[in-house]
Amino acid sequence: MNIEDSELCSSIRDDFYKMGFGNTPMLVHHMSNGSTIYAKLEFFNPFGSIKDRGSFFMIEDAIKKSDRNKKLIIVDGSSGNTGIAIGNICRKLGLESIIFIPPGTATETREKLEQSGAQIEVVGESPESTSTAMAIERANKLAIEKPDTYRFLHQHGNPMNYKAHIYTTGPEALQQMGGSPNYVAIAMGTGGSIIGNGLFFKERNQDTDVIMMQSNQDAYIQGIRNFMKAKDKVILEKHISIVDRMLNLSEKDAENGVKFLIENYELLVGFSAGGNFSGAMKIGEEHPGSRIYTVFPDSGEKYRNLYLSRNLTTDDDFSSLSKKILDIRKDYVTL
């Protein structure tokens, strides 16, 4: 990373913290065989997910590299947390944004997107489709047609997506853990979290193994993709050499993780967090006495219908757990 790029990222990092992002708490889970799991609770970010980090870095990068005399409108395709983060951050910074979403976007997620301040446009042929491919294509096309007005963030290929974790998440986790972990174990989405955290810890300790978890090819886990099936994976392909191993996750793994955290910590997390936790537990079982670092990307607040349909919790318990998270976040988040 050159000096100019380092100075830019440091400047964005400073703005990030000044505006109340980051510094999320960490769950520490001790296993009976001496292994310890360290999980960053990323739903303590102001707009509810780990995507606040990458979105802030991408948006501020666009602002700093744009002509301040021209109107700038941020565009991207998303089916959830990134869109929510972009809409809210742009509103906070006085920018307009357009988020293109697939038709099958969950009702709860769509409501959060509409509340974010972004203009929402549905793109896709099948009413049930949750693929963001056409949404991303539409955002890119708009930016190509009118480059002076629209800025396509391209979360799957924008280096600021993973650099956000090199400059914020990784350093926070290092301080909280009091040293490097033996394993960085994070499931792939856009690749920002696993690559950014992986690069950060590999630079500090080459003995740290980076384990990229992925969904089974026949599984659908909200927020987790499969490397072979994923179409847009620029960040992952560019930095795949830092990954020491891949670990497959099933839908049952994600469900078990969600259920364990509800029952043992009264913590309502999203499916990707459940998958990350289950994967980290498997690694901890394989390597007694190890330290495993992961992230919980979001809470389960947006997944009520899904969780009730799979009997992961009752309606009353879901409401109680959601309220608990909201109450804690009110006291914790200052933005």
Image: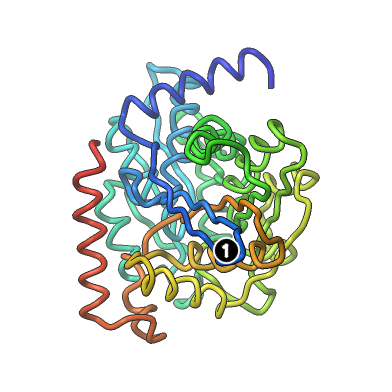
Mark 1: secondary structure: loop
Foreground residue, 220 or 34? 34
Task: Establish if 117 lies above or below 36.
Answer: above
Give left or right: position of 71 versus 233: left
Three-letter code for the amino acid on which mark 1 is drawn:
Ile
Q: Which residue is mark 1?
A: 224
Position of residue 305 measured from the top left corner of the image (x, y, whole percent): 33, 79
Q: How many marks?
A: 1
Foreground residue, 283 or 153? 283
Task: Establish if 286 lies above or below 10.
Answer: below
Q: Which residue is at a point 42% across and 54% down the rendered structure image?
A: 81
Task: Establish if 95 lies above or below 274.
Answer: above
Position of residue 161 measured from the top left corner of the image (x, y, whole percent): 55, 39
Which of the 4 quarters of the picture holds residue 1? top right
Q: Which quadrant is home to the C terminus? A: top left
Which of the 4 quarters of the picture holds residue 301? bottom left
Give left or right: position of 304 versus 143: left
